[in-house]
Structures are given as structure tokens and as C-alpha cells.
């Protein structure tokens, strides 16, 4: 029972963190040069894949910081959702094991 409650509390904390996530988008920003040899003509590109389609977009220098924040929010989202799924699986297994322990007749070997 303690294990189940502990997992439920961890899930609650993750859900709270997910609710606090702001605007997000996948991808990465790279610095490009129109003339690579002299490194002149700096511009930025946003590259990402969404719905199995790869995209590249031009980014104005004044928008780079805002986009970096959105990309970081997306990374947080992905990390938290992965952790949430892992904990949900663990919780489900723990609940099933508890139910099995409660319903198994005495003397019957435990299933693993």
C-alpha cells in the first residue's frame, strides 16, 4: 500500500509540473552563415519534425530567445510525459499484484 501511495504522489507532482508548462515546440535552432568562409551574413534556422514531416524555418534574430524557451518547454514536456508513463505502468503493476495477493487462496503458489 505504501508503494502505491508513493507512486500516486509522484504522479501528482508530475501532473502539476505538466500543467505549468507554457507554449512549446519541438526542434533545434542553428546559426547559419550566407558566406561560410568569412562567416558573414548570420541567420538562424529552426529544424524540427512534426507529424512525421521534417521542416526547416527561417528565424529572425530577435525571435531566437523566445523560440529557445519554447524548445526547452517541449523538452521538459517530453521528459515529464516519459516519466509519467513509466510511473503509470509501475502503478498498474503494483495494483494488480496487490489484488492478486488479496484473492489468491492460501497454499497456492504466487504468480510472478
Image: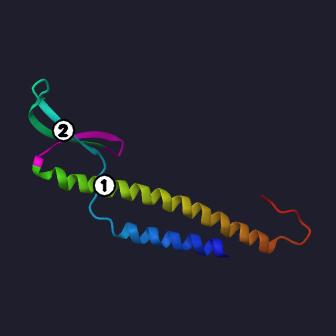
- Which residue is at 24% across, 52% downward? 68
Q: Which residue is mark 1?
A: 72
Assign the C terminus to one quadrant of the image. bottom right
Secondary element under disc 2, as helix, strand or loop, is strand
Is disc 1 surrounded by few (<14), some (14 to 19) or many (20+) residues within 10 Å? Answer: some
Against 25, residue 58 (above or below) is above
Q: Is residue 91 above or below residue 50?
A: below
- The alpha-carbon separation of the residues under discs 1 and 2 comes to 17 Å
Q: Is residue 101 left or right of residue 39?
A: right
Does the CB distance between marks 1 and 2 fall below 8 Å? Answer: no
Indicate left or right for 109 with 112 as reference: right
Quarter of the rendering containing residue 19: bottom left
> Going from the N terminus, do you reach mark 1 or mark 2 first?
2
Res 31 label: 2
Q: For the point 19% across and 56% down, which residue is it? A: 66
Q: Which residues are magenta?
A: 49-61
Query: Hey, which residue is sitting farthest left in the picture?
Result: 41
Amino acid at each position: 500500500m505504501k508503494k502505491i501511495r508513493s507512486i500516486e504522489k509522484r504522479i501528482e507532482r508530475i501532473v502539476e509540473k505538466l500543467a505549468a508548462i507554457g507554449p512549446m515546440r519541438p526542434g533545434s535552432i542553428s546559426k547559419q552563415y550566407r558566406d561560410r568562409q568569412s562567416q558573414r551574413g548570420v541567420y538562424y534556422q529552426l529544424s524540427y519534425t512534426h507529424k512525421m514531416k521534417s521542416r526547416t524555418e527561417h528565424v529572425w534574430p530577435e525571435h531566437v530567445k523566445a523560440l529557445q524557451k519554447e524548445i526547452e518547454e517541449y523538452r521538459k514536456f517530453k521528459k515529464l510525459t516519459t516519466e509519467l508513463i513509466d510511473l503509470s505502468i509501475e502503478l498498474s503493476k503494483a495494483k494488480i499484484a496487490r489484488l492478486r495477493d488479496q484473492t489468491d487462496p492460501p497454499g497456492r503458489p504466487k504468480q510472478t
